[in-house]
Amino acid sequence: MTMLPQVDSPQAWARLVVALVLSTIGGVGMWSVVVALPAVQADFGVARAAASLPFTLNMVGFGASSILLGRMSDRYGIMRPVILGAVALATGYVLAALSGGITQYAFAHVLVGVGSAATFSPLLAHVSLWFMRRRGVAIGIFASGNYLAGTVWPPIVAHFIGTAGWRPTYYGIALFVVATMIPLAAWLRRPPPHHDAATPAGTAPRTAATLGLSPAALQVLLIVAGVCCCVAMSMPQVHLVAYCADLGYGPARGAQMLSLMLACGIVSRLAFGFICDRIGGLRTLLIGGALQGLALLMYVPTNGLVSLYVVSALFGLFQGGIVPSYAIIVREYFPPREAGWRVGAVITATLFGMALGGWLSGAIFDWTGSYRAAFVNGLGWNLVNVSIAAWLLRRATQRPAYA
């Protein structure tokens, strides 16, 4: 007799490790295009704006495919979307390496974005199905994968581009992702546990009705919150290097601050995972959003080198747990069978927020000649996110009849 898989079991933790490795490997698609930008620009002889187009299309592919891949995982399980992602990732790198101009190179990165997307939001939702008591910790660990990718891949890609060139490096990445991701995906064949059986006796599952909302209304609110928090989040992450250059400290100092921020983000995601298991997703979102707003406020008067390092570290510690908390909220208030596409929808919203915020902060700088107004703009968007979280939490605590 085959034993059914259990939530929070050793098998669940082993699956989490596999998912984390897949996320770290698939995250190459988010970072290689940034590292290769100078070499590609020189090879094709184009301006910096044109050379930046591949990153934009990468984000388009990532965001647009997250919901579709989530639906696929809801219907067929996680193995198929991850295998599809590996194929898309490898194909994108091969087509990019074969490209004869920046246009072909840029559109090849749509496939690269699709491949990376398969190793984030669908896997994030999948991991959440294997945990109950330690769901926050598990999601925090998994969500660190894209930050780990940002730590591991840039020096590797930079080394091979410097020694072999960007085209051979892209061929090598394509081979590596196929050789590693497909076998790892096959390990995820078994379906997740039945959560109805794991629900404690006498405990009614929470739904959107618990908040006095329809599922569609709650989903829309989470999407709006996701956009707003990431418009605010993008200001330091996208413009910190340029901000340091404008202050006369040089881009290298800004890059160090960004690395410090990402490293602290890993710590944040793990710490907020523990917190989330104790207080729930809505409270975690509210606390993370409020702390992110505090860090943004601290950036406004800050222009000293040491103080910028400190504030950047604090920003990383404060904001890292926000995005994973959305996955927790989805799992708390929606059926497990809908987790893939609903998490994908919110993650797509956060990506749109990052893209919008990065552009908007640059536009505000162009209009005002200073980043101070851009930080204040981020605070305004962050206030909307905090207000939504506070309003939902208030409804959750004042509607016991629906529990």
Image: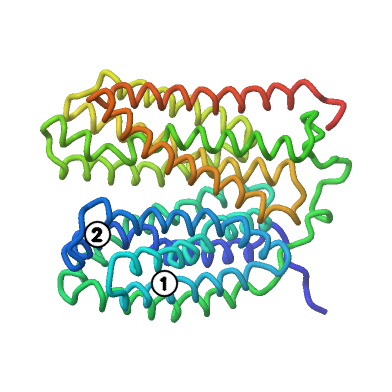
Q: Are marks 1 and 2 in contact (CB under 8 Å)?
A: no
- Residue 297 in the image: x percent, y percent? 36, 21
> Which amino acid, by three-letter code, is at mark 2?
Leu
Occupied quadrant, residue 179:
bottom left
311 relative position to 256: left or right:
right
57 relative position to 197: left or right:
left
| Residue at (35, 25) in percent of width and height | 375
- Residue 385 in the image: x percent, y percent? 55, 28
> Alpha-carbon neighbours of circle 1 within 10 Å: few (<14), some, or many (≥20)?
many
| Residue at (48, 59) in percent of width and height | 61
* Label drawn at residue 43: none
> Is 156 placed above or below 220 here?
below
> Is 222 placed above or below 307 here?
below
Occupied quadrant, residue 2:
bottom right
| Residue at (31, 61) in percent of width and height | 33
Classify mark 1: helix, strand or loop: helix
Classify mark 2: helix, strand or loop: helix
Real-space CA distance between mark 1 and mark 2, rounded to the nearest whole angstrom: 16 Å
Q: Where, quadrant-wise, is the N terminus in this rendering?
A: bottom right
| Residue at (69, 72) in percent of width and height | 190
- Residue 188 in the image: x percent, y percent? 61, 71
* Label drawn at residue 92: 1
- Nearer to me, 148 or 1: 148
> Which amino acid, by three-letter code, is at mark 1?
Gly
Residue at numbered disc 2: 37
Q: Where, quadrant-wise, is the C terminus in this rendering?
A: top right
Occupied quadrant, residue 398:
top right
